[in-house]
Amino acid sequence: MHAARLLASSARPIRHPAALSRRRAAGLAPAVAAAAVLLAGCGGGTGTTGQPTATATTSAAASSSGTPAATATSAPSGGRPAIVAVTTAGALVVLDSSSGTVTRTLVTGGVLGDEVSVSPDGSTVYFATGAGCNATVESVGFNGGTATSIAPGELPAISPDGSKLGFAQEPPLTPGCVPSPADLTKSFKLVIRTLSTGAEKILPLPPQMRSSGLPAPISHLSWAADSTRLAVSTSAVQDNEGWGLNIVDTSVARFYVVPGNGVSFVPVTGSPDVQRSYIREGVFLPDGNLFISRACCAGVPVHNTSRLMWEVAPSGALVHQVAIGYPNLDHVSLDASPDGNWLLYVAGGDLYVSQGGATPKQVATGITEAAWA
């Protein structure tokens, strides 16, 4: 679609070498105690077979297949925001959200395709770069300029009030980078950094998880409008089991997973197969609800049969079905514009945009991560 502009295109993400060192959709094999780590995808597939469909629903009984009963048609007023994205070649770019055209390149290479975030005033873009076993959170002006290093870490998410930056510090689960079994779970941390002072609050795994030897890798972060709560998506610990979405009250929480003490778990509801379904990723909407990627099913062998893009309440209850996605493709990089009128996500390297909950449209390809600017 826009292969020349975006440097690469694929119906499935093609990670550049730095991005391959991270662990999106990765799992730890049972032999973690021996530090033998295997990468396992959550959903394979070699291509898309058509546009996703969308329905306007209020029932928690939404199906994962079939013809939509109604199509959302609301179209909010206001200008269409730009998009900041990471290409499959590792470049950080600004896109026209209507055409998918690259309007500006901010960083030419080396950017990790895990998460990018734009400051509320639109002046600064936060991203991560990687080399070997190390990742660094950096920032660059929205209009370009020299990038500034902030701290070791990845998955940067700026709070809506612009005062705090959340990010993860965790080792890539690839050969040569995995800590010793005794240190593995100690290496996974959520960091909340106050930008004005540089002070940091560290939220590690709870003791019971540290002693288990199995970590809960963070895969995405999203702030609530109150700039206090964080939606923390965690990825699979083994095969495609262990995905989860926790709401962390950063003012009181001591850890970033396990309900209690400022942490609440968002349960999976609806159909199909609620017992084996999981939330692949979730982000806050301005009204306090969540935009999630709901997948089915967990287990071995990995075989996903359903991908649903839902708006849900913090209780997990379905509010609105945005789209029925492709079962064989991962649906990640979810984001909502500050006014909630625009949603985006990446499915198999293709970037989709939805206005006012309407049917998502593909606007670009060759993308690993994106966020509204």
Image (tube, grey):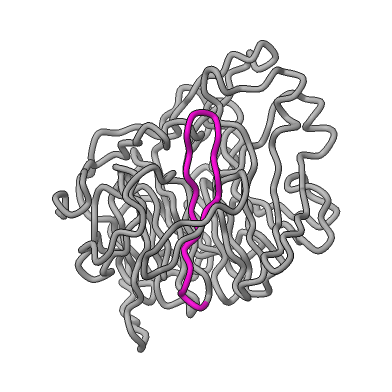
Query: What residue is drawn where x is 54% and y is 70%?
Result: 285
Q: Residue 135 appears in which quarter of the rendering?
A: top right
Q: Is residue 11 left or right of residue 56?
A: left
The quadrant of the rendering that contains the N terminus is: bottom left
Identity of the residue furthest to the front in this view: 146
Is residue 147 positioned above or below 239 on the image? Answer: below
- The x and y percentages for residue 274 are 56, 45
Prevailing SS of the magenta stretch: strand
Of residue 62 and residue 141, the one placed in the foreground of this image is 141
Count of marks, rendered view: 0
Q: Residue 35 appears in which quarter of the rendering?
A: top right
Query: What residue is drawn where x is 79% and y is 30%?
Result: 210
Asked if the magenta segment contains residue 145, the reply would be no
Of residue 57 and residue 165, the one placed in the foreground of this image is 165
- The x and y percentages for residue 8 are 21, 43
Asked if the magenta segment contains residue 123, the reply would be yes
- The x and y percentages for residue 189 are 71, 42
Query: What residue is drawn where x is 40% and y is 68%?
Result: 142
Magenta stretch bounds: 121-138
